[in-house]
Every structure is written in C-alpha cells, then in structure tokens.
Amino acid sequence: MASRTSEAEWRGDLKDGQGEIKLGSGAFSGSYSYHSRFEDSAGTNPEELIVAAHAGCFSMALAAALAAAGHPPAKIHTTAKVHFGPVPNGFAISKIELTTEGSVPGIDATAFERTAAEAKQNCPVSKALKAVEITLAARLV
C-alpha cells in the first residue's frame, strides 16, 4: 500500500503569522497565510490544495472507468471549486463543485455522464470527503 507524506510549518499567530506547505515528493511548496486563506492575497491555502487533489483524483478515476468500459479517453479536464466559510463555532468546507469535460471517442453523452457519476462515487478523495456535499457537472466534448 502506498504511503505519502507532506508537511506544513506555521510561524506566529493566526492573523499575522505565515506558513509554508511542502509536498513530500518535492513537486510543490508554497507559502500560506491568514490573508491567502480568508482573503484574496497571494499564496495557497489548505482548501485550494484539497480541491487540486480532488480534481486530479477524480480525473484519474474517470479515465480508469472509461477505459475499463472500452472507451479510453483522449482527454479529461476537471475543475474543482471549494466553498469555504464561517459556520457556527468556526469555519468549514460546505461544498465542492466538480466540473469535468471529456474527449472520449466512441461514447455518447449519457454514458459519459453516467460513468462520471460513478467515478465521483469511487474516487478515493471523494470517499475521504464524503462529509461534504460534492456536485458534478459532466460534459462530453
């Protein structure tokens, strides 16, 4: 079984502090702060990284499902949008919207949408985030 590690370091208090997030593979490191998380300042944030992982995982799950059905895709492009904001006693992710487009020879739109819905249910990141509402818009191009 695969095991992955990433790390984060935070320095200072919540509003004036800053941190850095690093992927264990070395493929990404980025700064984050209160302002990049709760406002529109430069830097990344945990929610952005979660939906990046979700878009990547879902795209792979959909490609695998399509190929297993005899329709290997030429391309899958997925955008994930996270809704994050205040709730009683803090902040929470309330919703993730997946929007995917696929170029898949030999499949019709209905079969593509059905396969995408199944991939959303079977994607490991979707499973990990099942406490959050996840919507899907799938379009064959």
Image (cartoon, rainbow, N blue to C red):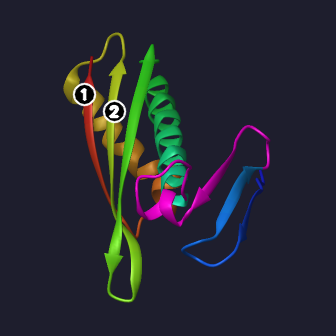
Q: Which residues are magenta?
A: 24-45
Q: Is residue 36 magenta?
A: yes
Amino acid type at mark 1: Arg
Residue 100 is marked as: 2
Q: Secondary structure at mark 1?
A: strand
Q: Residue at x 54, y 74 (%)?
A: 15
Based on the displayed image, in which of its 4 quarters is residue 8 positioned?
Answer: bottom right
Quarter holding residue 117: top left
Seen in the image, is 116 located left or right of residue 11?
left
Alpha carbon distance from label 1 to label 2: 6 Å
Q: Are marks 1 and 2 in contact (CB under 8 Å)?
A: yes
Residue 40, magenta (yes or no):
yes
- Residue 43 position (above or below residue 68): below
13 vs 113, nearest the viewer: 13
Q: Residue sitting at 56 percent across and 49 percent down?
A: 43
- The answer to whether residue 129 of the structure is visible from this angle is no
Q: Which mark is residue 139?
A: 1
Counting residues from the start of the chain, the first of labels 1 and 2 encountered is 2
Element type at marker 2?
strand
Residue 112 drawn at (x, y percent): 29, 28
How would you rate the neighbour count of disc 2 (Cα within 10 Å): few for under 14, some for 14-19, many for 20 or more? Answer: many
Q: Position of residue 107 (x, y in %)?
A: 29, 17
